[in-house]
Image (cartoon, helix red, strand yellow):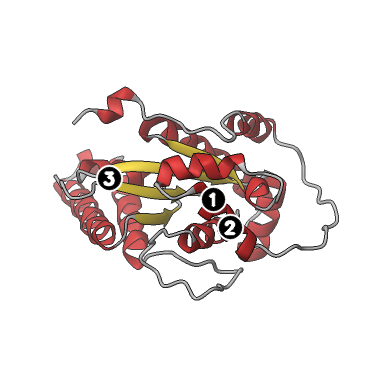
């Protein structure tokens, strides 16, 4: 168990929803993601993604793939433990270097808690129409797979932030100059100053011309999830009491 400054902030998102933009705003306001910020990044590939966090996530996902059949052989059982151990090694390395981490897997805060850190979770989401369009442009994935991923990952992130505490922010909020409550919630979740966060937003975000309306088949699950996520707008979420136990 670590005892030196155990708080670690995790920016969770599905990808293609502005996580690099929010990480840039937080970095400008004083956050340290362990990645050098040059004032710009590739909007198609993103930024602030730590190699160690990526390896931790990949190895943990591999351990989960083996978990289902690990009882069938000792080989699977030991390989599952090997990959899980590797994920902890990489995560420990990343969290020693920087107090902020950008990741797409909601299991990472759980692993951090097991290593003795106190997670604070920032969930960033975007309306599924714009998110799926962006993801399709980037990866070419079909709509049904994208909407399933959207629902599953955001629903899991919604649980995660209620377990460990933090806040939920939408891409639409951070890009709307009239929205400010999200910065106050982020300040409580990160320890940064709300005024600096808003000043960073003003410095980084550039206005864009309105885009033509996009159309996809509606998804009742995603619509219901958006209502739940929006219900936490501008709020700081306290950690569940069970998550606070040692």
Q: Is residue 50 above or below residue 63?
A: below
For label 2, the crowd category at 10 Å Cα-Cα, with few meaning under 14, some 14 to 19 and many 20 or more, is some
* Residue at 51 percent of width and 47 percent of height: 194
Q: Is residue 180 above or below residue 101?
A: above
Q: Are marks 2 and 1 in contact (CB under 8 Å)?
A: yes
**Residue on which disc 1 sits:** 195
Badge 3 element? helix
* Res 163 → quadrant: top left
Residue 4 x %, y %: 18, 50
Badge 1 element? helix
- Which dot, 1 or 3, sits closer to the camera? 1
Residue 207 shows up from this direction: yes
- Which dot, 2 or 3, sits closer to the camera? 2
Residue 22 x %, y %: 54, 56
For label 1, the crowd category at 10 Å Cα-Cα, with few meaning under 14, some 14 to 19 and many 20 or more, is some
Identify the mark at residue 199; answer none if there is no mark.
2
Residue closest to the far top: 241
Q: CA distance from mark 1 to mark 3?
A: 32 Å
Badge 2 element? helix
**Left or right of 241, for residue 17:** right
* Residue at 82 percent of width and 62 percent of height: 209
Residue 21 x %, y %: 57, 60
Q: Is residue 228 above or below residue 180?
A: above
Q: CA distance from mark 2 to mark 1?
A: 6 Å
**Residue on which disc 3 sits:** 111
Residue 167 x %, y %: 49, 38
């Amino acid at each position: 168990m670590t005892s030196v400054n155990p708080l670690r902030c995790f920016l969770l998102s599905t990808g293609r929803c502005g996580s690099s933009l929010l990480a840039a705003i937080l970095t400008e306001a004083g956050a340290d993601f362990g990645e050098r910020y040059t004032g710009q990044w590739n909007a198609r590939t993103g930024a602030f993604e730590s190699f160690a966090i990526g390896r931790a996530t990949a190895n943990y996902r591999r351990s989960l793939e083996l978990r289902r059949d690990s009882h069938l052989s000792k080989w699977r059982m030991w390989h599952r433990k090997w990959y899980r151990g590797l994920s902890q090694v990489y995560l420990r390395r990343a969290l020693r270097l920087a107090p902020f981490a950008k990741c797409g897997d909601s299991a990472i805060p759980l692993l951090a808690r097991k290593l003795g850190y106190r997670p604070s979770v920032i969930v960033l989401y975007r309306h599924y129409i714009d998110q799926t369009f962006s993801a399709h442009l980037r990866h070419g994935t079909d709509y049904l797979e994208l909407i399933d991923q959207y629902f599953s990952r955001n629903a899991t992130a919604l649980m995660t932030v209620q377990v460990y505490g933090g806040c939920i922010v939408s891409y639409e909020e951070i890009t709307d100059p009239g929205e400010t409550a999200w910065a106050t919630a982020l300040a409580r979740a990160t320890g940064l100053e709300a005024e600096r966060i808003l000043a960073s937003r003003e410095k980084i975000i550039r206005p864009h011309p309105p885009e033509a309306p996009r159309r996809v088949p509606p998804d009742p699950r995603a619509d219901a999830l958006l209502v739940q996520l929006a219900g936490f707008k501008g709020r700081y979420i306290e950690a569940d009491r069970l998550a606070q136990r040692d």
